Amino acid sequence: MVAKQQEVVDRLRSPDCFTRLKAVREIKNQIIGNKNRKLSYIKLEAVPRVVELLQENADAFLLVQSAATVGSFAYGLEDGFRAVVASGGVQHLLHAVSSQDDTVVEAALRALKLVWQSSGATPPHQLDGLNLERLISLLSASSTRTSEVATQVLAQYCQCANMEVLARLAQEPNVASALMQLLLSQNGGQEAAVTALALLTSSSVSMAAQCTVHPHWQHSLLSLLKHSKPAGRLAACVCLRNICLTPDIQDKIGATTVETLHRAMLPVLLKLLHMPNVLDTAPQVLTDLLQQSPAMQKAANDSDAVSSLTTLLHHEQTWHNRPRFKDGVLRALAILCKNHGDARMNFMERASIGQVARALDDADLQVRAAACACIQSLSGSMKCLRHIPMAELMPPMLRLLLQTEPELQHSALKALSNLVLDTASAKDSVAQSAGLPAMVQMVGTPDDERRCSAMWALANLIHGASPAVCDAVMAALPWSQFLPLLQDDNSCVQDKSFMFMRNLAAGRSAAECVKQWSHGSAVPALVARMQKAAKRTGMP
Amino acid sequence: MARTEAWTKKTVSKDDWEKKLAAVKIYKEDMNKLVMNFLVTEGYVDAAEVFHKESNTKPGVDLAAITDRMEIRKAVQSGDIQQAIERVNDLNPEILEQQHELSFHMQQQRLIELIRQGRTEEALEHAQEYLAPPGEEDPAFLEELERTVTLLAFEDASQSPLAGLMDVTQRQKTASELNAAILSSQCQEKEPRLPTLLKLLVWAQNQLDTRCTYPRINDLAAPTLTDPMQT
């Protein structure tokens, strides 16, 4: 067998063109879909010999077969990919794309597509200069097959490229218009065009804005919301989201049209979440949509989105090893439950709090933060707060409060702020743990928002608290550390500091404790503060 | 008092029915597109060309590609799998490269043809080179490989319990799988739309049968309306 294969490889260097053509075609037909054969031929050093054939000013048949063979060697096999790159195969394929013969161009494009599908996260070569110009020009080729494959190559390249490369590609002239025009085609170019547009508009606001120059952009993208493939529908949602986020879009097309676009996207996104293999971007796009618009939050709640999202949480296989997906689902739930009592109660009725509690210990930082946001939203109403199982939630919440990541700490703080408001067990948990010193420490942070959140949390902690909790708080936060907060530059911090004092002083015996805590300075400090405020406002 | 009303189905007369049908607007262009879709998907290239000239309805696909697809399908149906593989790789190398199950079935069919021709040594070599490696990676492939190789154990495989593999229907199955993959790669539907519309018609009539008596179409090939007044 090896001898036979060696004989075929030797024929690649035959002086006779027809012999070389037959040999490369034989290799091609043996290796397509067959890893073992690819490996055998790679060991026999067939790859550099086939790449040599691409360099010739050979006839079109030979170039077509050589290009297809190079693409096949690179696909699905790391050794093959490396052999092709090392032999300069990619450069020669890029050169072949400039051929005057459509069949050669198409073969070279297909081969490039296979190469870049194998390349993992980044393409081995960045497209620039003439190569990029040529590829973009092929998007509008007169041959539909060439145009279709060129679009697929561009989409594949975009999927491999990083944000910097995408942003540069988005600056190229004619890319937006060529891709928008392809949205109207009925072939494979349509899906590739919307995929490329989704990636490019995500990297560049100006690209998203350019899409709106095309006369039928709304019709094209709305039609694609019904694409037969979920990936096509999702890409259309991403494009619409990006366009709706461009500055002045409401001035350009009107708030009503923006809402119409959002309403069209919503049911598509909710269905996509339950499709197997849907990309992780789906819940993120939904979250962005909900964040932008209270009307969409209401529409989503009317469509029973909370049930749909909590169903996903209950099925581990949908988000296992997919932290971005889980993060998106939790954030969408956080938004839906934030200002909507019905949504909160629906969530609690579906017994999903356990899933969120487990997410507080997730290995992924963003998932933990999203779970905190969810808890914060759920605990935003007293009615819901009473149904929250504190024993299950407090330990992971306190662990998050002690983590070093500032954003995560802040998310945990805001959620705890609600949890400790009305529940004695939650207050006790904080007061008896390292959570209390952590909160007090955050009161001294230079960040205004975090300082305010910390003060608010302490104010809530002390509200209706037992004497033991009050004592613990007063011990952790000495008067000398607290006094400056009453005069803080940030009005929210001041406001919450006063709230803290009010809550602390409620009740005669508590007032006595406050007097002791402040060494008698509390009342004079409050009076001084009120006088200062009165002077500023011109009141007596 | 119990309710004992007898429920009777509503009856729609043929005249009323025809009046309702006449009120529905169907555009000639839509019908032409349906006809073209059928011709193109089923591979009637010459008919599609003539229809295009006569009705000015665009085929929507490259007719040369249909010819290629039909040649490929014929090659599989006649047992020339090697020819089919070479042609499909010339048409679009991505198809067999990316669809492992299809690629396996093509190689499996090639094995069956070698067994049919009595080329036992070649068959074994082919099984070892092309089918054993995917069989090692996928238990489903291994099971199919084992079934196919078992044909070699019988003097007359066509009389064995696995005779189905030797039958032309197996070739047809492989041909249909390959045809569907080619159509999909060209972003065409795997089936024409006309059968789907007819299925919808049959389904709708079945649903309507439970609710009323009306002029049915009983023969789809000669779609005359029955008269519900005549039993």
Image (cartoon, coloured by chain):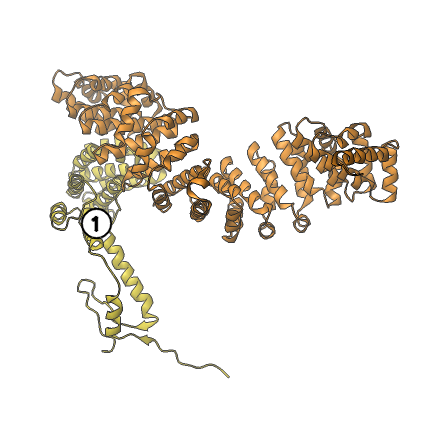
To which residue does mark 1 refer? B37
Q: In this view, does A173 lie above or below B1?
A: above
Q: Residue at x 26, y 29 (%)?
A: A138
As rendered, which of B142 and A101 lies closer to the eye? A101
Image quadrant in which the C terminus of chain B is located = bottom left
What's under tag 1, amino acid-wise? Asn
Q: Which residue lies furthest to the bottom in this view?
A: B1
Looking at the image, which is closer to me, B155 or A428? A428
Q: Is residue B162 visible?
A: yes
- Residue B145 visible within the image: no
Image colour for chain B is: yellow
Q: Is residue A239 left or right of residue A99?
A: right
In the rendered structure, the answer to whether residue A393 lies left or right of residue A425 reads: left
Q: Position of residue A309 (x, y in %)?
A: 51, 46
Q: Which of the 4 image quarters holds residue A187?
A: top left
Check the rendered structure and report the hue given to chain A. Answer: orange
